[in-house]
Image (spheres, rainbow, N blue to C red):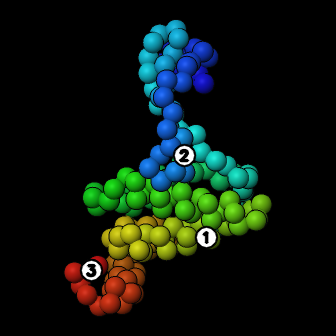
Amino acid sequence: MRCPFCANDDTQVKDSRPTEDNTAIRRRRQCSSCGARFTTFERIQLREVTVVKSNDDREPFERSKLEQSVTLACRKRGIDREKIDQLVSGVQRQVETSGEAEISSLAIGEMVMEGLRVLDSVAYIRFASVYRSFNEAKDFEEFAGTVRDVAGGDPDNV
């Protein structure tokens, strides 16, 4: 593993342990050249999956892009980082175990929306506003009405 500080290729693993949800290995490393310490995460990748975008472009599935969009939707909502990681890991697992070499971005978006719907209704609406391309305030109103229906009509739950 290359040192992010001095680019030396010789680093040593000082400590390894599984993450809280057992989906990755956290490794503390130290550079033999500059002595800097840094953390890496090792995750299982079952297979290479290609994402088919709505404009028919194709690109490799990237967990980091998925994580970034979920994190943005959950920003300032007080949601534990661990819960976000569990959601992202769950979607990644669904994508990789689907048995398909290609998956549409729409299918991934639906998986994320389902997870966010359960996790936090505001994050769910934020993600949906981008994913479904809301253009007007009435789009938000209509969608929020469906969320309220799902939440049992309790306005405090939305």
Tag 1: amino acid: Leu
Rendered-image quadrant of the C terminus: bottom left
Question: Which residue is outermost to the left?
Answer: 156
Real-space Cα separation, disc 1 to disc 2, in angstroms: 26 Å
Q: Are marks 1 and 2 in contact (CB under 8 Å)?
A: no
Tag 2: amino acid: Ala
Mark 2 neighbour class, 10 Å CA radius: few under 14, some 14 to 19, many 20 or more: some
Q: Could you tell me how many numbered marks the image carries? A: 3
- In front: label 3 or label 1: 3
Rendered-image quadrant of the N terminus: top right
Q: Counting residues from the N terminus, which is met first, the one under dot 1 or under dot 2?
A: 2
Left or right of 46 on screen, residue 147: left
Image quarter of residue 117: bottom left
Q: Counting residues from the N terminus, which is met first, the one under dot 2 or under dot 3?
A: 2
Mark 2 highlights which residue?
A: 24
Residue situated in front as seen by the camera: 129 or 88: 88
Residue situated in front as seen by the camera: 40 or 63: 40
Mark 3 neighbour class, 10 Å CA radius: few under 14, some 14 to 19, many 20 or more: few
Question: Which residue is outermost to the top?
Answer: 33
**Secondary structure under the numbered disc 1 in the rendered image:** helix
Q: Counting residues from the N terminus, which is met first, the one under dot 3 or under dot 1?
A: 1
Q: Which mark identifies residue 123?
A: none
- Residue 64 at what x, y percent from top left? 54, 48
Mark 1 highlights which residue?
A: 106
- In front: label 1 or label 2: 2
Left or right of 19 on screen, residue 107: right
Q: Which residue is depicted at the point 76% across and 65% down?
A: 100
Q: Which residue is depicted at the point 48% across and 29% down?
A: 15
Residue situated in front as seen by the camera: 18 or 39: 18
Mark 3 highlights which residue?
A: 157
Q: Which residue is depicted at the point 70% across and 52% down?
A: 46
Q: Which residue is depicted at the point 49% across and 23% down?
A: 14
